[in-house]
Amino acid sequence: MFAAAGFGTMVAMIKFVGARLDVFQILLVRQVVMALIVAPTILKNFPGSLQTNNFSLQLLRIVLALIAMGFGFTAVVNMPFADATAIGFAKSFFVTICAIFFLNEVIGIRRWFAVIIGFIGVLIVLRPGFDGFTIYGVYALIGSAGAGAVMVVIRILTRTESATSILTYQALGVGLAVAFPGMWFWLWPTPLEWALLVGMGIISYFAQMLNIIAYKYGEASVMASLDYVRLIYSVFFGWVLFEALPDIWTWMGAMIIIFASIYTIHRESKKKQIIISTAEGRGKTP
């Protein structure tokens, strides 16, 4: 719950400073702050932290992270807060789809049905062909797809790579990628904007750490389901900071997305329990 609050606060900060500053500049400062925080861990194992068994997959993870953050942040800045958050929840559907191609997973009819229902919810929020439609809604969906793909790639990387290696390539790779455009579009921040930019990086780091701790000790399906309280935070921040409340279509679409996502998470968790039980029954370590 604290991690969800942290992520919700971070996105609100992005929307606030994005009113004047370019998204690449926001990404650059955020990445520098996070890199400074994790620098002791990286330097402690340097140059071993740069060792990797799959450089191409590390590079793919960086590219997908750039897509997720670039399109996702742009959507947050330019469209209603709650709408962007609701569409962002579609990443669980993209995880399911990407798992077919990257992990060779077999997806049952019920999970496919949940994915289809979930995308119907996305269409309700997007409202293509109607007055409420905006291209930034498509940006949010692309960002969501990138985030889902990143999760699958990280699953593959953890088979052969250390956590330090994955962290190092993400911190350095994304930072280097946004350095040039971030400097090109640079506008000198005001003292308030500096405080928000630095705070954004700090909050983002601790939110990720809280998320890792939650998944370490809690049941994954429950932890993933609790992430959806971010919608409550986005509605609150949207109302207090930006004087905007979601309309009935956003609420309807968001509820459909959330319920379909939770069902997808539940099915995946149940599938893993069956695999573990079968392995234990055969006397094997799953």
Image: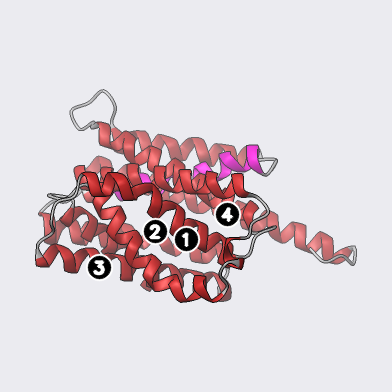
> Residue 20 placed where, x, y %?
12, 49
Measure how far apart labels 1 and 3 are at the Cα level. 29 Å
Measure how far apart labels 1 and 2 are at the Cα level. 6 Å
Count neighbours of disc 2 (C-alpha within 10 A) and say few if under 14, some if 14 to 19, many if 20 or more. many
At a point 10% along the width and 67% down the height, the residue shown is 191
Count neighbours of disc 1 (C-alpha within 10 A) and say few if under 14, some if 14 to 19, many if 20 or more. some
- Is tag 3's residue or tag 4's residue first in the polypeptide sequence? 4
Measure how far apart labels 3 and 2 are at the Cα level. 26 Å
At a point 39% along the width and 52% down the height, the residue shown is 176
Identify the residue under disc 2: 228
Front-most of residues 57 and 147: 57
Residue 165 is drawn in which quadrant? Answer: bottom right
Q: Can you tell which mark lies on residue 15?
A: none
Amino acid type, label 4: Ile
- Specify the quadrant that holds the N terminus: bottom left
Identify the residue under disc 1: 225
Farthest right residue?
Answer: 282
Where disc 2 sits, the SS reads helix
Say left or right for 80 vs 168.
left
- Is tag 4's residue or tag 2's residue first in the polypeptide sequence? 4
Cβ–Cβ under 8 Å for marks 1 and 2: yes
Mark toward the viewer: 4 or 1 = 4
Count of marks placed on residues: 4
Identify the residue under disc 4: 154
Front-most of residues 146 and 66: 66
Q: Can you tell which mark lies on residue 198?
A: 3
